[in-house]
């Protein structure tokens, strides 16, 4: 369990593809009892449920255009108004742009709310490329393997269903390197935006999952009590 807070905690998790952000977000959500909010998940949910926001977002996506920041922020704010977000929330991969960050800050201020901190998972690019380019998927059941960290028992065969394993185009080394270049170029202004506000806490993401998780909890100033 964690120390009790009288005010909601709103925390942003930043991290490049392959940094382990999703894993850490899930652990923090479980340990802190705070919902994990991802803009990608919200898009899919609103589109699936055919809400007004979902229909608007789909119209942009179908036209091959970027969804406006105002619409994305509106989805996030609506989610933050739900009951399970009363104690706070973890924003996983949102905001993604400087425009979204500015719009989110303004909207939260109008509700007398604010972002408490930004946990920035820093991982060397070589490690990111290794993590992403080593991933292989099963064509039949969708199981995921990693040639170094979670290799299949038999080469090119799924342990679960014996289906063929393949590597997605997005996970090929040359594609991964390009994805990372785009991420860092887009994220640099966003990171500076929060650094100027003294919100960024850097986390060494090159460490083990357990150590990274512990560093995150310490960074948040939370007190753990573990069962003996």
Image: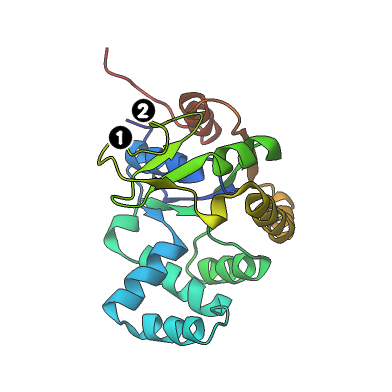
- Is 60 situated left or right of 174 in this image? left
Q: Is residue 5 visible?
A: no
Quadrant, the C terminus: top left
Give the camera-side residue of 22 and 127.
127
Q: Going by the image, does 67 lie left or right of 54?
A: right
Q: Residues within 10 Å of mark 1 (few under 14, many from 20)?
A: some
Earlier in the chain: of badge 1 and badge 2, it is: 2
- How many other residues sit within 10 Å of disc 2, few (<14), some (14-19) or many (≥20)? few
Q: How is the image coloured?
A: rainbow
Disc number for residue 159: 1
Q: Which residue is drawn at 48% across and 29% down?
A: 149
Is 3 situated left or right of 194 in this image? left
- Tell me if residue 222 can be seen: yes
Q: Name the residue under label 2.
A: 153
- CB atoms at circles 1 and 2 under 8 Å apart? yes
Task: Residue at 56%, 62% (x, y): give it.
Answer: 95
- x%, y% of residue 10? 47, 52
Q: What element carries label 2?
A: loop
Q: Which of 128 and 72 is in front in this view?
A: 128
Q: Which residue is pictured at 32% across the width and 20% down the height?
A: 226
């Amino acid at each position: 369990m964690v120390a009790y807070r009288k005010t909601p905690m709103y925390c942003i998790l930043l991290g490049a593809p392959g940094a382990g952000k999703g894993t850490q977000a899930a652990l923090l959500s479980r340990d802190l009892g705070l919902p994990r909010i991802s803009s990608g998940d919200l898009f899919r949910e609103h589109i699936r449920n055919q809400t007004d926001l979902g229909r608007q977002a789909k119209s942009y996506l179908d036209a091959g255009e970027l969804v406006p920041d105002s619409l994305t922020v509106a989805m996030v704010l609506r989610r933050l108004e739900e009951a399970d977000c009363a104690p706070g929330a973890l924003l996983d991969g949102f905001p993604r742009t400087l425009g979204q960050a500015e719009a989110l800050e303004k909207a939260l201020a109008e509700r007398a709310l604010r972002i408490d901190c930004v946990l920035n998972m820093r991982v060397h690019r070589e490690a990111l490329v290794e993590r992403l380019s080593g991933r292989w998927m099963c064509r039949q059941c969708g199981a995921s393997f990693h040639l170094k960290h979670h290799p299949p028992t038999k080469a090119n065969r799924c342990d679960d269903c014996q289906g063929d394993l393949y590597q997605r185009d997005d996970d090929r080394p040359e594609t991964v390197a390009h994805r990372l270049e785009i991420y860092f170029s887009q994220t640099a202004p966003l990171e500076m935006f929060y650094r100027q506000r003294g919100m960024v806490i850097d986390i060494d993401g090159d460490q083990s999952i357990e150590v990274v998780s512990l560093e995150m909890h310490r960074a948040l100033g939370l007190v753990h009590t573990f069962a003996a």
